[in-house]
Amino acid sequence: MTDEDTATGIAHMAGAILALCRAAGLKIATAESCTGGMIAAALTDVAGSSDVFERGFVTYANSAKCDLLGVDPALLEEFGAVSEPVARAMCIGALARAPVDLAVAVTGIAGPGGGTPAKPVGLVHLAAGRAHGALRHRSQIFRGGRSAVRSGATAAALAMLMALAESPE
């Protein structure tokens, strides 16, 4: 898949999510680390997104995860920023700090450096949840350079939002 194909897919998915959420009266927030605001940008690239997209938190530094999303520093210490517990805590924090129905959180290692054998470059943890409802997690290792990892994580996050918006709970 080319970068242009990925960008077209992301734009199409963002538009579909916004239309679905608009029809259901749902609001969205994002909590992003390795994607650095790309999910929020994909959503806000669509005209009329302001009636669905409420806010985005870009929490690249661990201190920002704690300050803006209420991530417990003990989680970061024990599991590291790129982990399921931290992705879940970021999502819960976004839901708690924004008047929204759905949130998605992403934390990962975009590269080219920073990877370890246990947490290789391309590893991304994603969490998506509903206010007072289901919270889903997935992890994936995205292949390719930094741009490919970030684009892949953005597409995966949008897919998780779509699945949540389509499900009644």
Image (tube, helix red, strand yellow):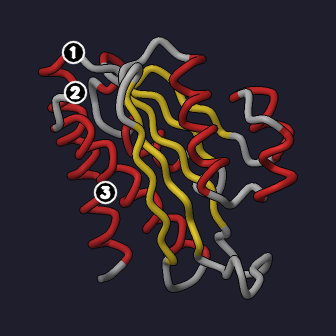
Q: What percent of the width, then of the height, locates residue 12?
A: 21, 52
**Label 1 sits on what residue type?**
Gly
Q: What percent of the width, then of the height, locates residue 21?
A: 22, 27
Using the image, tell me which numbered label, if any, was put on residue 21: 2
Residues packed near mark 3 inside 10 Å, few (<14), some (14 to 19) or many (20 plus): many
Does 6 sit left or right of 115 as displayed?
Answer: left
Which residue is labeled 1 in the image? 25
Between the C-alphas of marks 2 and 3, the distance is 16 Å
Q: What percent of the width, then of the height, locates residue 9?
A: 25, 62
Q: What residue lies at 17% left-to-right and 36% top-to-bottom?
A: 167
Q: In which quarter of the image is the N terminus?
A: bottom left
- Dot 3 lies on which element? helix
Between the C-alphas of marks 3 and 1, the distance is 22 Å
Q: What residue lies at 61% left-to-right and 28% top-to-bottom?
A: 93
Residue mark closest to the camera, 3 vs 1 = 1
Which residue is labeled 3 in the image? 10
Q: In which quarter of the image is the C terminus?
A: top left
Residues packed near mark 2 inside 10 Å, few (<14), some (14 to 19) or many (20 plus): many
Total number of numbered labels?
Answer: 3
**Label 3 sits on what residue type?**
Ile
In the rendered structure, are the residues bearing label 2 and label 1 in contact, judged by CB atoms less than 8 Å apart?
yes
Q: Nearer the viewer, residue 96 or 64?
A: 96
Between the C-alphas of marks 2 and 1, the distance is 6 Å
Looking at the image, tell me whether mark 2 or mark 3 is earlier in sequence order: 3
Looking at the image, tell me whether mark 3 or mark 1 is earlier in sequence order: 3
**Label 2 sits on what residue type?**
Cys
